[in-house]
Structures are given as C-alpha cells and as structure tokens.
Amino acid sequence: MAHRRSLFTAFTRQASTFLLKNPTPSSLPSLSVSSHFPNPSSSLPIFTKPLSSFAQWSHLRFFSSDKQSDHHSNEIVEDHGSDDDEVEDEDDDEEEDYESKEGYDDDDENENVSVASRKKVYTKEEKEAEAEAIGYKVVGPLQKDDRVFKPYEPVFAVVQIGSHQFKVSNRDSIFTERLKFCEVNDKLILNKVLLVGSDSQTIVGRPTVPYATVHAVVEEHALNAKLIVFKKKRRKNYRRTNGHRQELTKLRITDIQGIEKPQNVLPEKPPKAAAKKEKEKVAVTA
C-alpha cells in the first residue's frame, strides 16, 4: 500500500506540472479548414471545436485513473530504459558461456593428456633407492650361460621383503607382493636378511645380518585368488559385494650367502653285488 501511495503522489505531481505548463483549452487556436485548404472562396464550415490539452499527449495510458494500470505503466517506463542493458548483458553472458565451453573442452583435452602421462617417471637412482627400501636390488636379466640353480644345501635364512618375512632355503619358491622395477627372469639380491642358520651355527641380526644376502630369480607376476569383500548395514538396506585379486610376484631362491655351508657328505652304501654272489654260493652248496 505504501508503494502504491508513493506512485500515486508522484503521478499527480507530474500531471499537475504538465497542466500548468500547457495552455488552457480556451486559449488553444481553433482549427479551420482554411488552414488546410488554400482556396479562400470556399465557404465550408469551420471546425471550431477546441482540442483538449490531453489530446496533445500521445501516451494516454499514463493518465489512467486505475492504480494498478498506473503501477504497470511505471514498470513499463522503467523496463524500456533497461531493455538495452539486458540485451547487452545477455550478449555478454552468451559470449562468456561460449568461452567457458571452449575452456571446458581445453580442460578435458588437458585431463586426457595428463591421465596418459600421470605415471611418475623414475630415474635410475630413484628406482634403486625405492627398491632398497623394500628390501631387494635388481642385478639384471638372467642369461643362458648363468648357472644359478645349485643343488640343495642345508642352509636357511629369514628375509624381509616389504612388511613380510619369509623363511627360505635353496630352491624354495615364495610369493610376495608385486615388486616394481623388475621383470620376469630378472636376478634379484635380497638385502634384508634377519637370520641365517645351518646345522652347525645360527646368526641372528640386529636387526639384519651384515654381509648376508639371498639371491633369487623372478619367475612370474601373477594374481592371487579372488577375495570377496561383503559389506552390510542392518536395517539400512545396504549391501555391497566386491572382489579383489592381489598382485603377486613369484621368486625362486637360488643361493644363500653369508654363512659357512657344511659339505654334503653322502653316506657310503654297501655293495649290493657282493651280497648277491654270497647268497648264490650258499644255494648251490645246499
């Protein structure tokens, strides 16, 4: 209501100032046909009806007595002034949207490129440092002339690879978590030896045994058996089932160094041929 009253007072003020500035209807010049037709001899009637002062104002809608129409007219006047600004704003928004779409396309292309090159490129020193932190060192690929596989020796060792410990001996095979920077048929040296033992002695490290190493060969990279991960929240209708297969690396132990190895002395076997001949002679004499 207060807004309507303020509009009504403003309208009345404008109307009053307009009427004061314009002449009264009595002082308006009368329109005659002579002013329109140059022939003076014509005795046509003269239109002496004066024009109203409101007839000079082309926009009659501004002088409506309805409050709602007055309010609507004021809004129209304001809107006409702001149409050009809105058009310019819309054009600017369209340009910004187009530029932003182009920017999004560029971002998508950059993301595709970054995904392809997201893998970190390691230098030789970084590879060696990370492998040493895990507990191994890559020597190189296995050659045909290398005779790494030796006969069994009564020596065992406890090695640590990552966060796991394994008790190994010659010709054993173990499965560890996937080892980086090594391929199949690569020779490895396991540095973290916690314990070395044989039939005659045992050496315990603090925490590792110095100068003790375990040699191995990478046989394959495989996947472990599938594990089912099931999650449930009772009374919430929440159930999720997922599977997981852990990546593994199979190692074949070829040698254990850092301890005196006892010699493999094979027990002497009795000659079988002499025993058979004696049995035959006894049978003949009988």
Image (tube, rainbow, N blue to C red):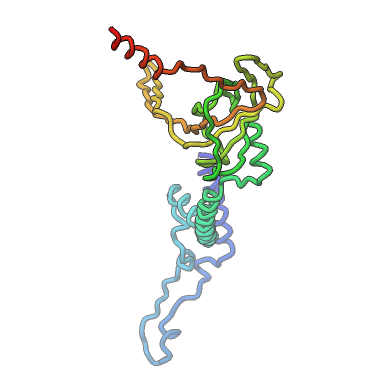
Location of the C terminus by quadrant is top left
Task: Give the farthest residue toward the top.
Answer: 286
Q: Nearer the viewer, residue 186 or 156?
A: 156
- Residue 285 at x, y = what percent? 30, 9
Residue at 50% from the left image edge and 26% from the top image edge: 172
Q: Is residue 83 visible?
A: no
Q: Nearer the viewer, residue 245 or 75?
A: 245
User: How many numbered marks appear?
Assistant: 0
Residue 141, by quadrant, is top right
**144 versus 245 height, above or below:** below
> Image check: 65 left or right of 9?
left
Q: Nearer the viewer, residue 281 or 2?
A: 281
Q: Nearer the viewer, residue 243 or 81?
A: 243
- Residue 152 at x, y = what percent? 52, 25
Task: Give the farthest residue toward the front.
Answer: 285
**69 versus 268 height, above or below:** below
Residue at 54% from the left image edge and 42% from the top image edge: 142
**112 versus 142 height, above or below:** below
> Image check: 79 left or right of 129?
left
- Residue 114 at x, y = what percent? 55, 50
- Residue 127 at x, y = what percent? 64, 41
**274 versus 77 height, above or below:** above
Residue at 59% from the left image edge and 43% from the top image edge: 140
Residue at 59% from the left image edge and 36% from the top image edge: 188
